[in-house]
Image: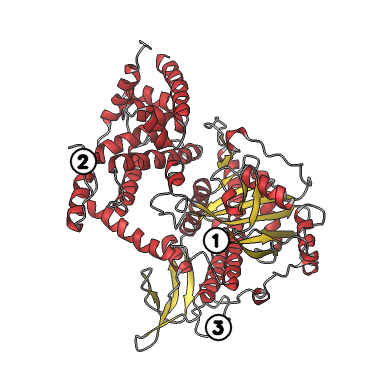
Amino acid sequence: MSHDNDDDIRAALARIADTVRSEPPDIEHVMQASKQATTRDQQARPRAEVMHRADAYRRRRTTLRLGVAILGAFALIGGLMAIRTQQHTPDRAAVEGTTTSAGGVTTVTGQGGSPVSFPAADPHAKNILIVGANSNACVDPNSPWAGAAAAASDDLGTRADTIMVVRVDPTRPGLAVLSFPRDLWVQIPGRGKQRISSAYVKNDYSLLAQTLYNNFGVTVDHYVQIDFCAFTRIVNAIGGVAVPFTTPVRDRNVGLIIPSAGCHTFSGDEALAYVRSRHLAWIDDTGAAHEDRSADVGRISRQQDFLLRVLEKSLKTGLVDPPVTEALIRSLQTDIVTDQGFTLQEMMKLAGVLQGVGPLSVGEYQIEGKGITVGGNAVLAPQLDSPNMRAVLAIFTGAAPVPGDSDQTATTSTPASGAATQPPQPGALEGDIIPDPRTDC
Amino acid sequence: MDVSEISMPDVAAGAEHSFDAFYSERWLSMVRLATLTTGSTSLAEEIVQDAFVQLHRNWTRVHNPSAWLRTAVVNHGRSWVRRQVLERRHQLSGTDVAMPDEGVVVRAALDRLSSRQRAAIVLRFYEDLPEAEIAEVLGCRPGTVKSLLDRAKTTLRKELQQ
């Protein structure tokens, strides 16, 4: 075999390619899928950057709940995988490049060999950096293939919508969550001052971790990257999630139709349309439609209600039904990226803690910021000097223990904006379409 | 007809028509490309269909549909390959297409490469792209492509000679 030219390789590739036979499916399938994706996208488009302050707070609040709920599902799946691993004993063959595997979980180390340099954290408690990437409902036309496309049009690339650090102490039944508004104006190593969200690099958390340490003294032990695709796949994996409605409802904008009162089971895509719906209307006896009057508040309440039902269903079905277990494992493999050290054992510990506290009885905090304008951009300058903020940061830097169930109130954060101290509650406004959380389906 | 020279149609019906033609013309070669990078024809078909859906949504904005589609197929394929590697740990069957014996050897050799190396090799020696264009598809520097290719070739030849 000659090595002077590469015809041997050309011939080898052609040999395989020539054996492939495939007929294009009816083009109608493509047209149909394209149309559906476009409809979904129109709803998923991000709103104007400038937001009412309370509105912005509510959104952060929601993404935080979303993150905690998905983390719960994530930890649950980790537990399920342990069971599977014992049954199958997967082989330990090396996987390509910087990606390695622990029990089937995708793990990624920092690219370019840039080590993250900060001191080792408290040996017991762990900080888990969770990044929720908004990939525009999985169907963003230009961004899924990162690199070339993302660099050319950065506003269409996959964005970090949610940045939070969850602190878990396996020795205590407590969980604390610190979220970082994505408009926080911080010093990013090698880049000067920018929004914190621009420190996010897909599949590489080193820059973001270093930024968190430099600005807030918060270290990162583990990394979890999720996107909205994970949400839809998990819903599908558990066979859909049922929600009770007291009337028929619909949202023409997203093509959502629930034709009759009673329990409706959502599939993944439909569920995404439901939790993102901004124009949900209920249908009265005469067939007239009445739009949800409170717009975002109703929507957020529905999201929270829905996520709780997702968790509940995951716990109910995932543990006993092998095909569901399998599907959940698959969704973990495909949709969630973690760091190399986030082993099964670590996840098990986390799952144990979550079982102890329940997904919503956690200490929820956020970095406080002052709205400023820099070069025409509305951003948030971190305000870290208040006694409250110091107490919060003490938890996440290991200077103070993670608050357990009993002492949680002692350091509960009060957000800077007075208007937004109360999170929206289900049933807060009359006229909202909010399923009764006490009703089971 | 060189598909990369399809001009941008501004009449809706015309746009539908040329997409239609492009679809049937490029389907097989894209499935072959994705089969090379992923090792599975059924997976390749799925990836290619997804890519066409996304192309259709952007049809009037994409200036070079051929290159656009190739990039989509290769990069979609790469993320699929990562998943596949992991899924094989749970399923014994790796590929779902019956390869002739000589194909099995080549396939096995390709499987020894990283997904990036495999993509580079396939783009260079199956699609005959110059290194600069491969760099664009993979979103890396041309120098990186050169070293990816060098290392991949060494690995491939070692495997094929065994």
Which chain is mark 1 on?
A: A
Residue A61 % position (x, y): 61, 67
Q: What residue is disc 2 on? A: B25
Element class at badge 2: helix
Which chain is mark 3 on?
A: A
Residue A263 % position (x, y): 45, 74
| Res A352 seen here | yes
Q: What residue is disc 1 on? A: A376
Q: Amino acid at mark 2?
A: Glu
Q: Residue at x 45, y 18 (%)?
A: B154
Q: Nearer the viewer, residue A318 or A328?
A: A328
Q: Amino acid at mark 3?
A: Leu
| Res A355 seen here | no
How dense is the environment of label 2, judged by Cα within 10 Å: few (below 14), some, or many (20 and up)? few
Which chain is mark 2 on?
A: B
Q: If you read the primary sequence from the N terminus, does the residue marked by circle 1 or circle 3 appear first?
A: 1
Q: Residue at x 74, y 60 (%)?
A: A384
Q: What residue is disc 3 on? A: A429
How dense is the environment of label 1, judged by Cα within 10 Å: few (below 14), some, or many (20 and up)? few
